[in-house]
């Protein structure tokens, strides 16, 4: 994973409760079943081209409770969410979802790649994940397409009012 | 048999993949599928799942609740949207506690998820509702001169437990739909692998290597075109093909068509009608072959 992974693991770094924290979250329930066979890593299309991204290693680190190392790791964000690992895991571990749980925990600590912040703010403002240029919206008519469905940002914001992640990025924006 | 749907465009299609929408609307109209526009729209939620599962669930549930108010099922062109809406619908139907929690959020904006509508991807509507026989009957210009390759979007296949459509290890639907046009659909190495699109923005280099690997395998079997059913996969192969060629010193020249563009050609529609001009990789060679009918 990161350079830091090469450092020897100290017992003080391991949080024995971390695996139970993950197991309580949607998609993380079966973390403890992993017996490190490596099907996930060998079938992962990203691992094929990345020297650092290894789903099996991420799962083991989660089981060991290496919370800080994991949540600060850049490679956590490389998963393409193709779900091949989840479908092929002989133990039924939802590998991609465990990685998503870890990313969500990192995001709650404010560790979020810029692309996700941009998409979140675009959704809050316009309903769409990308800021669709006015020219594109107008061009629809000349292409013979119906008008783009309107969104209701006020209603969206009301539904999302209690979402923890938004509070984190709001705080960062201050 | 439901042939009236709420069309859910998603975000990528209106942003930069209009050829897919134009061609899909044309062929669906020809096949008698009526499309109603979403009364109100927000992103399906998938792009934000990595940072907030909670936010994804709420955004998806809002769309399902809006569709319920209209009493119609959803048709999406994007496998990401279809997969997300399917997954969330299943989760909320099966987990009462989660449903109540999400409905508590929706209540703030006067919405409620009841679980009465279904979301389907274009491929699923074509195969399950329209039916392959009706599609075959609509063909006036069989594309027997073409040999193509297919690329399914991951999210309409996996995770199998939640999606339950086709076989993720050996998907047949897109192949069947392609062969209905008369074109031959070739097998190639690692057909079901991801195009890499979701990693763009985090590491473009890794993402483009995934797409390059697929293009190499497609080139190996001499496919004349690649057929996709996902806006993101299409961006990876079509919009980025020249970039990949430059970056890795490769030559592909493989046109990338949205499936409804292929079907539309076989239905006798013109390349202009099907927005071929919006595609980045040159399609003139295959259009010429189709027009001349030579194999």
Image (cartoon, coloured by chain):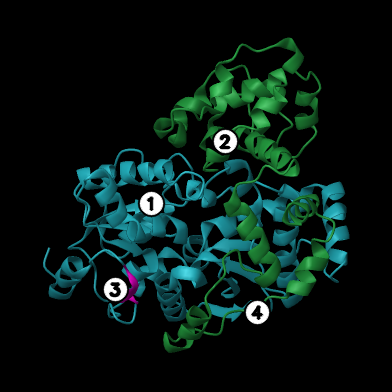
Chain colours: A green, B cyan
Question: For mark 1, what is the residue?
Answer: B151
Q: Quarter of the image holding residue A42? A: top left
Distance (Cα) linking label 2 and label 1: 29 Å
Considering the whole magenta stretch, tell me its main secondary structure.
helix
Q: Are marks 2 and 1 in contact (CB under 8 Å)?
A: no
Distance (Cα) linking label 2 and label 3: 45 Å
Labels 4, 1: one chain: no
Question: For mark 3, what is the residue?
Answer: B265
Labels 2, 4: one chain: yes
Question: For mark 4, what is the residue?
Answer: A150
**Chain bearing mark 3:** B
Residue B186 seen by the camera: no
Question: For mark 2, what is the residue?
Answer: A74
Residue A58 is situated, as x and y percent measured from the top left of the image, at: 60, 26
Q: Quarter of the image holding residue B2? A: bottom right
Give the residues drawn in magenta, as a range: B275-279
Q: Secondary structure at mark 3?
A: helix
Distance (Cα) linking label 3 and label 1: 19 Å
Residue B29 is situated, as x and y percent measured from the top left of the image, at: 46, 80
């Amino acid at each position: 994973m990161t350079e830091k992974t090469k450092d020897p693991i100290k017992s003080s770094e391991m949080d024995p409760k971390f695996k139970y924290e993950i197991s309580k979250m949607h998609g993380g329930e079966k973390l403890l079943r992993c017996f490190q066979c490596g099907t996930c890593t060998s079938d992962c299309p990203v691992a094929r081209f990345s020297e650092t991204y290894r789903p099996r290693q991420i799962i083991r680190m989660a089981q060991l409770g290496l919370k800080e190392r994991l949540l600060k790791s850049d490679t956590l964000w490389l998963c393409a969410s193709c779900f091949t690992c989840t479908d092929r895991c002989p133990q039924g571990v939802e590998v991609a979802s465990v990685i998503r749980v870890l990313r969500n925990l990192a995001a709650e600590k404010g560790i979020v790649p810029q692309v996700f912040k941009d998409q979140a703010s675009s959704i809050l403002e316009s309903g769409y994940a990308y800021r669709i240029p006015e020219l594109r919206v107008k061009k629809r008519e000349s292409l013979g397409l119906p008008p783009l469905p309107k969104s209701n940002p006020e209603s969206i914001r009301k539904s999302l009012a209690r979402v923890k992640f938004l509070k984190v990025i709001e705080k960062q924006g201050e | 048999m439901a042939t009236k749907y709420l069309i859910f465009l998603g975000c990528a299609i209106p942003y930069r993949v209009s050829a897919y929408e134009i061609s899909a609307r044309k062929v669906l109209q020809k096949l008698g599928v009526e499309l109603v526009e979403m009364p109100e729209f927000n992103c399906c939620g998938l792009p934000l799942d990595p940072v907030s599962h909670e936010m994804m669930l709420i955004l998806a549930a809002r769309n399902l609740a809006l569709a319920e108010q209209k009493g119609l099922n959803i048709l999406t062109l994007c496998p990401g949207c279809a997969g997300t809406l399917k997954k969330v619908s299943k989760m909320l139907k099966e987990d009462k506690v989660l449903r109540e929690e999400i409905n508590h959020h929706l209540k703030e904006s006067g919405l409620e998820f009841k679980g009465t509508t279904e979301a389907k991807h274009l491929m699923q509507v074509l195969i399950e509702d329209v039916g392959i026989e009706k599609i075959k009957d609509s063909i006036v210009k069989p594309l027997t001169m073409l040999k193509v390759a297919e690329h399914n979007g991951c999210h309409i296949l996996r995770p199998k437990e939640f999606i339950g459509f086709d076989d993720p290890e050996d998907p047949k639907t897109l192949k069947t739909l392609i062969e209905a046009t008369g074109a031959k659909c070739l097998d190639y190495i690692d057909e079901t692998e991801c195009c890499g699109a979701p990693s763009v923005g985090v590491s473009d280099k890794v993402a483009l290597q995934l797409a390059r690997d697929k293009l190499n395998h497609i080139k190996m079997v001499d496919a004349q075109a690649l057929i996709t059913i996902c806006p993101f996969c299409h961006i990876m192969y079509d919009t980025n093909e020249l970039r990949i060629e430059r970056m890795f010193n490769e030559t592909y020249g493989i046109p990338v068509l949205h499936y409804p563009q292929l079907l539309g050609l076989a239905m006798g529609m013109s390349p202009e009608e099907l927005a071929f001009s919006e595609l980045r990789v040159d399609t003139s060679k295959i259009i010429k072959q189709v027009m001349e009918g030579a194999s």
